[in-house]
Image: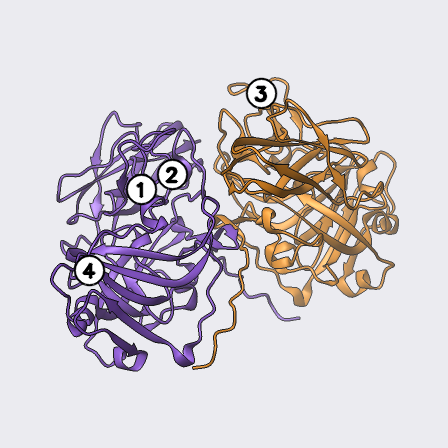
Chain colours: A orange, B purple
Amino acid sequence: MSNQKHPSERPYLKTHSLQPENQETPIQFIENNHVHPKLFYRRNHFLFPQLSYSNYFLTINGYVQKPRVLSLQEIYQLPSKTIKVLLECSGNKRHFFKPKVFGEQWEKGAISQGYWTGVPLRNLLDKVGLRNGAKEVVIEGYDFGERSDLDHLYSFTRSLPLEKALHPDTLIAYEYNNEPIPFKHGYPLRLIVPQWYAMASVKWIKQITIIDKEFAGPFQSIDYVYYPNKDDNEGARPVTTINVNSTIQKPLNREILNTGKHTIKGIAWTGTGFVKKVEISTDNGDTWITANLENQDTHGYDWVNWSFEWDVTKKGEYTILSKATDSANRTQPKQPFWNRKGYGYNAIDTIHVKIE
Amino acid sequence: MSNQKHPSERPYLKTHSLQPENQETPIQFIENNHVHPKLFYRRNHFLFPQLSYSNYFLTINGYVQKPRVLSLQEIYQLPSKTIKVLLECSGNKRHFFKPKVFGEQWEKGAISQGYWTGVPLRNLLDKVGLRNGAKEVVIEGYDFGERSDLDHLYSFTRSLPLEKALHPDTLIAYEYNNEPIPFKHGYPLRLIVPQWYAMASVKWIKQITIIDKEFAGPFQSIDYVYYPNKDDNEGARPVTTINVNSTIQKPLNREILNTGKHTIKGIAWTGTGFVKKVEISTDNGDTWITANLENQDTHGYDWVNWSFEWDVTKKGEYTILSKATDSANRTQPKQPFWNRKGYGYNAIDTIHVKIE
């Protein structure tokens, strides 16, 4: 026998369910800023669809002047752009709501980011020509199945208002990190909608339909709606823009540390403008220190990394908080906005450590 | 492009820390009764050790008549036995203690099982001959490092009382599921101590030393001790035998289900005798039903599978409980025995589901 090579340690997706597959990114252990496809969180409403690539075409129809059917080759030949975009499931951190809510118990890892390459949706819409009165763009995925609350089969279908559909950074993407998008993340075509929660970024696009009214499919009218009350639907409003948010990556929650110097680090992001400031507290909010922002970018759709050098001399238990503020002056609240289906959690991030 | 093969879904280890590596088994998704090595939970106190296999020998010394140094070949040639044994970290379910405790936040997956093959430790002790007055057998692993609470370097070392060391099913194991034990699980030699929490099953055995007194290393005198009080050590007692316990695998906690029939299933285990009964409640403990035990085995050291067919017609929220009782009439308590370091959690298992 030869000498043992030192074995490596690597993190894995955290499994929530398998059919459909829902697994989250081990966000505390993500060190680069374009998440490896294997560690990109997987969020599905249905079993994976069966696609026939040999006759895959993208249909664009509805309230348009000239419907089109485009092959992948035609799409690949159009001018493309590459944008770094984070996708965050609107159920990210659902696990932390109190009172607790039902549904996938995402902890802090229903978020990932990387480089998406594709054709701006607006360029495809130019090809078909919107008719006067066009109001929304409906994107249907190939994934479909039953819902626990309705009787029929539904495909995963969402709409965008024209303004968002025509934004130059809303993409029909076909590459992630310079490789074809992995099947589980939407191959061959996936919509990428920067700044909105990722239910908008429909995978396995089947067709695009322009309509002259408001779309009312169940993934828009039942799910992905903030319901502020437990027992009625009063005050319901749709889930759209990502809330300002932050996550502490290090130390780990409930970690036991020595006295001395420790780096507190994490990520912060927003769907409005850019992250302007991240504040850290090591005394449960009594005092706050501004963290160092490592890659602040006023135009990006990605997260910023932040860090703070903590020199701790006194043994005991500490509650560490992180609070991000964005350029629109939105800031993380102390208490999350509770809603029945558990979307948009963005309370100040909190961990507890013990120094001994 | 050819047609897409339906992609498979598979669960992964759940990452708690990487250096040292601590990752738990996705226990809800384990369907067979000998866990694949890739999904066996990993629990380490230190970085992985560097071993030189080319001159690996097992030393057995101390309070013996004739110390021995055995090569792996010599050990492989001794009569072996294969036993199905579950290993459970004593910190399994630590996450669920209230008030919460510090340390690795194991959820329900710091448990795995499979077939271990090796030589009974007693047969090796026969070779060296215990001297009169021998009291404990100390097993030292190759893994070592710093502790947050002490100044020196320590190896992971534990002792067994003679009675446990001489039990015919306490093994010096070299195979798991008929393959060499994977490095991360103790290759080339691992102690397997059935019925005790797995801190006793020392990995990467370096040497075995017989002593005539009680061993007092920090992994025995500081860690792996039940401390009932937060602020003092009164009533401290060592962690040894596995408590009677059960885990619901299906449904998943916070899952949303239809009305109709659902299988409630899970596992149950104990370190004393065998699991005699598993009871299920779907009304938060008001009424209990006896579950079907699928592989009850009065002599095994493994878990039993249990299941119950639930026919639910009324919509609403349900709290589902599972409670195991063993042949020593130990039963899972409603409240866990809280202790400062968070060992031995075995409260009645609880999940919440919503029927809609």
Residue B225 got which mark? 1
Question: CA–CA distance between discs 1 and 4?
Answer: 20 Å
CB under 8 Å between callouts 1 and 4? no
Question: CA–CA distance between discs 3 and 2?
Answer: 44 Å
**Which callout, 3 or 2, points to the residue nearer the camera?**
2
Residue type indicated by callout 3: Asn
- Residue A338: where, in percent of width, then height? 58, 24
Protein chain holding label 1: B
Image quarter hosting the C terminus of chain B: top left
The residue pinned by badge 3 equals A233
The residue pinned by badge 2 equals B341
Residue drawn at the location 28% of the way across and 44% of the way down:
B239
Label 2: few (<14), some (14–19) or many (≥20) C-alpha neighbours in 10 Å: many
Residue drawn at the location 75% of the way across and 48% of the way down:
A85
Protein chain holding label 2: B
Label 3: few (<14), some (14–19) or many (≥20) C-alpha neighbours in 10 Å: few
The foreground one among B153 and B336 is B153
Is disc 4 on the same chain as disc 3? no
- Element type where label 2 sits in the image: loop
Question: CA–CA distance between discs 3 and 1?
Answer: 51 Å
Is disc 1 on the same chain as disc 3? no
- Residue B38: where, in percent of width, then height? 43, 63
Dot 1 or dot 4: first in sequence order is: 4
The residue pinned by badge 4 equals B165
Residue type indicated by callout 2: Lys
Give the answer, above or below, for where B130 lies relative to A335: below
Residue drawn at the location 53% of the way across and 49% of the way down:
A23
